[in-house]
Image: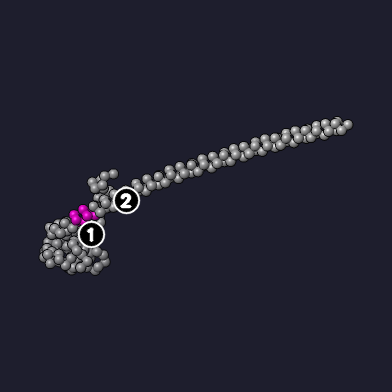
Amino acid sequence: MNEKLQELTNKIFREGLEKGKAEADKLVSKAKSEAEQMIQAATDEAGRILAKAEKEAAELKKNTESELLMSTKQAIVSVKQKITDIMVDETVNQAAADAFDDPEFVKSLMLKIAENWDKIENDGKDVMFFLSPKEHSQLESFLKGKVAAKIKGGLDIDFEDSIKSGFKLGPKDGSYKLSFTNKDFSHFFKQYLRPRTRKFFVED
């Protein structure tokens, strides 16, 4: 009787032990499977994060390089334009200064205006010429001679310190002035010369 009881007890123990071991193995297997799934999910997520970061870094690099290239081109164009403007300014300013330093050129310009003064002033108003202090004495006799003969009205001559070369003129009543100074001609010619002469100063 005791032997059968002992055998039954051992059987129950073994079965319980085996069942417990099976349950434990099942739990361990499940835990391993879940752990592998978690590791895989974490690995996948890390891969997505890395791929996104690499894509954003590539886009940032591309955009930065594009902006730098565009800025460089704009800077080069700006420098070329400034160089062109400086060279054209110097060329045109010098040409205008040389022209207005030539008394014969100034005389011919004055005479041409005087010949056409009646078209500007139909009623023949008296004319007032304004010269630089230097040209005042040099051109006074010419103005009183040939130029005065071309104008219907009277002719007065004065000077302005602000005029360096060239002249201004208008009706004696001061209602307006026509300016023919080297600065006026420089400004006028630059409007036409810059687009046409740019290629002679800076290669595109």
Q: Residue at x 24, y 64 (%)?
A: 177
Whether residue 32 appears in this view of the structure is yes
Magenta residues, start to end:
89-96
Q: Residue 74 at x, y = what percent?
A: 35, 48
Where disc 1 sits, the SS reads helix
- The residue at which mark 1 appears reads as 183
Q: Residue at x 77, y 33 (%)?
A: 14
| Residue 30 left/right relative to 130 | right
Q: Residue at x 42, y 46 (%)?
A: 64
- The residue at which mark 2 appears reads as 78
Q: Residue 176 at x, y = what percent?
A: 26, 65
Q: Which mark is residue 203?
A: none
The amino acid on which the numbered mark 2 sits, given as a three-letter code, is Ser
Return the residue nearer the eye: 168 or 83. Answer: 83
Q: Quadrant of residue 107?
A: bottom left
Q: Quadrant of the C terminus?
A: top left
Q: CA distance from mark 1 to mark 2?
A: 25 Å
71 relative to 180, above or below: above
The amino acid on which the numbered mark 1 sits, given as a three-letter code, is Lys
